[in-house]
Image (spheres, rainbow, N blue to C red):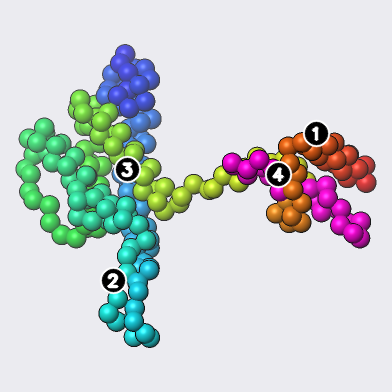
Amino acid sequence: MTNCLLCEQPDETGSYLCPGCTKATRVRLEGLPVLYRGLGALLAPVGGVGQGRSGKGGPAPLPVSLDVLDVRGPGGMAGLLESWVDAVRHDRGRPEPAHTGSPEGRVDRTCGELLGHVPWIAVSWPQAGEFAGEIRDLARSVSSMIRPPAPDRGERIGNCPAVDPSGALCGAVLRLAPGEKAVRCEWCGTAYPPFVWAQLKTWIDEDTAAAGAA
């Protein structure tokens, strides 16, 4: 029994990558061309400064993200994948033709070739862990560019117990935003500083009990 070089868990197969990490690496390689094309939508130019309605004479618009440009460029995802293809070809004694064509086409071809090598990589290649780790990190990085993590909305406190002049209960969800020292209702604007939090909890509990009894 050996340990998988990626997840470091014991593996009865004696391979460099356990079956789970082998499958995950295959899935990530299959998804990388799709992620690469998804980055194209993030390259819409913004921020150009023109002169008058013609828009001529100003500096060229900048892309949304230089990180996206780096990944989409010839030396980005395509270059990284090709470096692994070259390493595998060398260690397997395979021909090493030059990589040509557009970056998108190169990503498609290299992912396809690496998928064909995955069974050998998992079983026979000492660099399998480093390879699978870089593929995992690349997939996560690109996924985060396309689908950034949701902003932290803060801790949910309960429902706002404020009552307006007509006697209506606000009831909006209260959250303590990161870095804030007071709970503020985004709906009615009522602020609850720390010295009233004990009373705030009492009010929230009373409103919750009343709603349950209704």
Of pointers 3 and 2, the one earlier in the residue sequence? 2
**Element on which disc 2 rests:** loop
Q: With respect to residue 106, does 120 lie above or below?
A: above
Given residues 157 and 42, the one toward you in this image is 157
Given residues 76 and 152, the one toward you in this image is 152
Counting other residues with Cα less than 10 Å from the Cα at mark 4, is it few (<14), some (14-19), or many (20 or more)? many
The circle drawn on residue 60 is: 2
The amino acid type of the residue labelled 1 equals: Ala
Q: Which-is-in-front pick, marks 4 and 3?
A: 4
Q: Residue at x 90, y 59 (%)?
A: 165
The amino acid type of the residue labelled 2 equals: Ala
Of pointers 4 and 3, the one earlier in the residue sequence? 3
Q: Residue at x 38, y 30 (%)?
A: 20
Q: With respect to residue 46, does 201 lie above or below?
A: above
Residue at which label 3 appears: 138
Q: With respect to residue 210, does 46 lie above or below?
A: below
Q: Which-is-in-front pick, marks 3 and 2?
A: 2
Q: Residue at x 35, y 74 (%)?
A: 49
Distance (Cα) linking label 2 and label 1: 56 Å
Q: Residue 139: image x %, image y %?
A: 35, 44
Counting other residues with Cα less than 10 Å from the Cα at mark 1, is it few (<14), some (14-19), or many (20 or more)? few
Residue at which label 1 appears: 198
Residue at which label 4 appears: 183
Q: Which residues are magenta?
A: 160-184
